[in-house]
């Protein structure tokens, strides 16, 4: 139940002294001054925060993730390009390869790529960044051409001057469009619409770009070659298309989620799709029904065909390529090339004490350690989710229980995580990704999902989970509970909710984040009822006192941190028992230790890793559940 009120008290949980990053890297320990300076007696700079050496704790089987190919584009028989979920762009001199890595940023999650020619490509990502290049084979030519605060799901270029991208807009479904894609973009926003799932552009004769949202609506722009994107119109369709492909402005085909994972129609008489299960590629010739043409048991994820031709290439979930010279042939011959990529990402971490830490990864594993800073040999890894899905968040209210939230609505409860590690998988949220997990005790857990739901249980190891739709048209990005009677949730759109009785689904809408906060909240921790920190998607940290006003936020200065881009996102934030606060960002660890100016002392961070900048995705400070709360930081400094 969701109600409205104007004031509340808040307390939340804290989060890290061990930091997890993409590619299986763990950083620790972190330490601050031996003793905290008295703010009433001194304003001199105290000791700096120091970091231990980063350690690779996930690097070999059975921990290796599969670098799913998420997009393939072939503008001609002599050039193809692909992207993967681990931020890799590859090119090849045709569908048969060989494929060469051209650009890599593992902090990105590329979702699609489109090349109008061999000298013009755009790639989009989950972080809202679009990269473009007029020399795709040259790493230095790839640069950010669009930044926005929501995921981009698809991109399509009919020509270098006719491109569109799909995703979530400022207040609903969004389609971005441009006639100068490496320089400027405009957005067509459809209020209260879900994010657009796919987009396809075609040219000659005329121009057309069509976007689909997966829920029965299509948005399209049809205009003359001289004035593309002059107008947009909405059309309702019977089938809920999640993919669309236009061979020409007058020949488009869409497919629903229950039939198709990806679709490409290079001509008016040929379409190739990957089925919903991702194991079979099917083709349609002459507008007929789709029939099987090849299979790949480990999974297929993206298809791209030579524009105007019949040669096609399929990207797989394990980083391989499957190609044919003629997908229209009655018995098409498909050839598999490449080797499966061995990559993984640690996605979150929780430490109950300096001798009890757990981490989760992108392939269904839980790692636990009683000596978390002693390297890979000190961590025990268990496959707790047989599906191999990516964990989003983990919270361990006691040393006897951990709760992990996953994609596709699953949770895993792990009993005795430092011993027998007994895991139980349950689906509590349908197909929705579980974005947030907070368990203040073994008798209460609260989850936040991407489908606007809060899900609670007073018996987390059982099937007794209750779904409470909060009806905000936005996903829940933060849930945090310091006690069983003090819980808070924040949505991606900045709606702030509270509850003093979450066990009975009694939630209150407090209001929206202040207008001065331009980015969506991504992380939050409260050390007491009067001190909270919020990290947002633009790299800003905010301090608030919910006992006075939950909607009154003050920005904490951070020196030398790039801000106001999607790459600046604060992924996690936590404070330890000895007054050290740490925030994790893309390539930066931001820390504050006691010492200076009335509240805190020196902003200090040393280099945490010599690796290529990557996303530090989780942070957990030991002793947070039993220690006294830290004071609020006044200034911060980043390190990378």
Image (tube, rainbow, N blue to C red):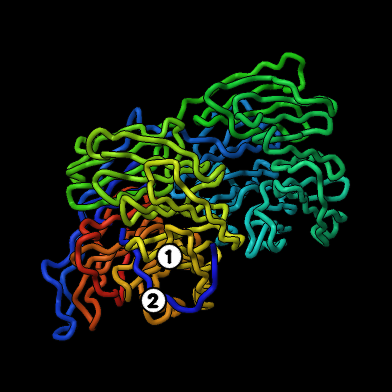
Separation (CA) of disc 1 from disc 2: 11 Å
Q: Is residue 399 found left or right of 445 in the rendered image?
A: left
Q: Quadrant of the C terminus?
A: bottom left
The x, y position of residue 497, in whole percent, is 48, 67
Q: Is residue 508 shown above or below 217? A: below
Name the outermost residue toward the front.
504
Please report whichever mark, 1 or 2, sits nearer to the chain's N-terminal start: 1
Task: Determine whether the residue tagged by mark 1 lies in a helix, strand or loop.
Answer: strand
Q: Is label 1 in contact with label 2 (beta carbons under 8 Å)?
A: yes
The x, y position of residue 466, in whole percent, is 49, 50
Q: Is residue 261 shown above or below 552? A: above
Q: Is residue 407 shown above or below 381? A: below
Residue beneath disc 2: 546
Q: Nearer the viewer, residue 482 or 598?
A: 482
- Residue 562 seen anywhere in this rendered image of the structure: no
Taking the spot 75% from the left edge, 40% from the top edge, the residue there is 245
- Residue 132 seen anywhere in this rendered image of the structure: yes
Q: Is residue 598 found left or right of 125 in the rendered image?
A: left
The tag on residue 488 is 1
Q: Is residue 404 found left or right of 160 in the rendered image?
A: left
The tag on residue 48 is none
Q: Quadrant of residue 453?
A: bottom right
Q: Nearer the viewer, residue 634 or 88?
A: 634
Q: Quadrant of the N terminus?
A: bottom right
Task: Determine whether the residue tagged by mark 2 lies in a helix, strand or loop.
Answer: loop
Taking the spot 48% from the left edge, 63% from the top edge, the residue there is 506
């Amino acid at each position: 139940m969701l109600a409205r009120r104007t004031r509340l008290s808040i307390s939340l949980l804290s989060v890290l002294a061990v930091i997890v990053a993409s590619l299986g890297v763990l950083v620790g320990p972190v330490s601050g001054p031996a003793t905290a300076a008295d703010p009433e007696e001194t304003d001199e700079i105290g000791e700096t925060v120091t970091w231990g050496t980063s350690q690779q704790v996930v690097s070999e089987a059975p921990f290796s993730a599969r670098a799913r190919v998420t997009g393939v584009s072939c503008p001609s028989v002599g050039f193809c390009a692909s992207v993967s979920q681990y931020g890799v762009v590859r090119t090849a001199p045709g569908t048969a390869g060989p494929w060469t890595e051209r650009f890599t940023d593992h902090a990105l999650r590329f979702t699609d790529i489109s090349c109008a020619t061999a000298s013009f490509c755009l790639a989009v990502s989950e972080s809202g960044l679009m990269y473009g290049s007029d020399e795709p084979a040259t790493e230095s030519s790839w640069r950010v051409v669009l930044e926005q605060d929501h995921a981009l799901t698809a991109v399509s270029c009919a020509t270098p001057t006719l491109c569109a991208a799909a995703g979530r807009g400022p207040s609903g479904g969004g389609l971005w469009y441009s006639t100068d894609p490496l320089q400027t973009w405009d957005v067509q926003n459809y209020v209260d619409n879900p994010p657009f799932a796919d987009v396809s552009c075609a040219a000659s004769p005329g121009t057309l770009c069509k976007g689909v949202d997966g829920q029965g609506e299509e948005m399209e722009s049809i205009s003359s070659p001289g004035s593309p994107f002059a107008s947009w119109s909405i059309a309702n369709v019977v089938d809920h298309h999640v993919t669309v492909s236009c061979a020409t402005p007058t020949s488009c085909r869409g497919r629903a989620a229950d039939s198709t994972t990806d679709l490409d129609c290079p001509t008016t008489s040929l379409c190739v799709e990957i089925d919903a299960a991702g194991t079979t590629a099917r083709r349609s010739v002459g507008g007929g029904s789709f029939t099987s043409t090849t299979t790949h048991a480990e999974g297929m994820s993206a298809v791209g065909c030579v524009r105007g031709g019949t040669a096609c290439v399929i990207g797989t979930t394990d980083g391989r390529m499957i190609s044919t010279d003629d997908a229209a042939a009655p018995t098409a011959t498909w050839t598999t090339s490449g080797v499966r990529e061995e990559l993984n990402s640690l996605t979150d971490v929780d430490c109950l004490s300096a001798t009890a830490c757990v981490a989760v990864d992108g392939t269904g594993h839980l790692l636990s350690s009683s000596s978390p800073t002693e390297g890979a040999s000190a961590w025990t890894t268990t496959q707790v989710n047989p599906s191999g899905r990516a964990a989003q968040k983990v919270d361990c209210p006691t040393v006897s229980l951990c709760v992990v939230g996953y994609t596709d609505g699953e949770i895993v409860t792990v009993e005795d995580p430092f011993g027998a590690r007994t895991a139980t998988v349950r689906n509590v949220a349908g197909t929705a990704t579980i974005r947030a997990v907070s368990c203040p005790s073994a008798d209460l857990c609260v989850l936040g999902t991407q489908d606007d739901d809060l899900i609670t249980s007073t018996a987390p190891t059982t099937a007794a989970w209750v779904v409470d739709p909060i009806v905000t048209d936005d996903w829940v990005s933060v849930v945090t509970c310091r006690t069983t009677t003090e819980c808070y949730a924040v949505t991606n759109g900045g709606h702030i909710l509270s509850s003093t009785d979450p066990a009975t689904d009694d939630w209150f809408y407090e209001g929206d984040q202040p207008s001065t906060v331009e980015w969506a909240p991504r992380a939050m921790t409260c050390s007491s009822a009067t001190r909270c920190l919020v990290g947002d998607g633009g790299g800003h940290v905010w301090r608030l006192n919910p006992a006075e006003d939950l909607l009154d936020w003050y920005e904490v200065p951070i020196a030398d941190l790039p801000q106001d881009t999607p790459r600046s996102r604060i992924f996690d934030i936590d404070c330890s028992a000895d007054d050290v606060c740490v925030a994790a960002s893309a390539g930066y660890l931001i820390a504050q230790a006691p010492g200076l100016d009335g509240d805190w002392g020196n902003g200090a961070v040393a280099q945490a890793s010599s690796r290529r900048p990557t996303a530090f995705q989780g942070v957990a400070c030991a002793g947070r559940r039993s220690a006294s709360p830290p004071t609020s930081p006044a200034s911060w400094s980043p390190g990378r």
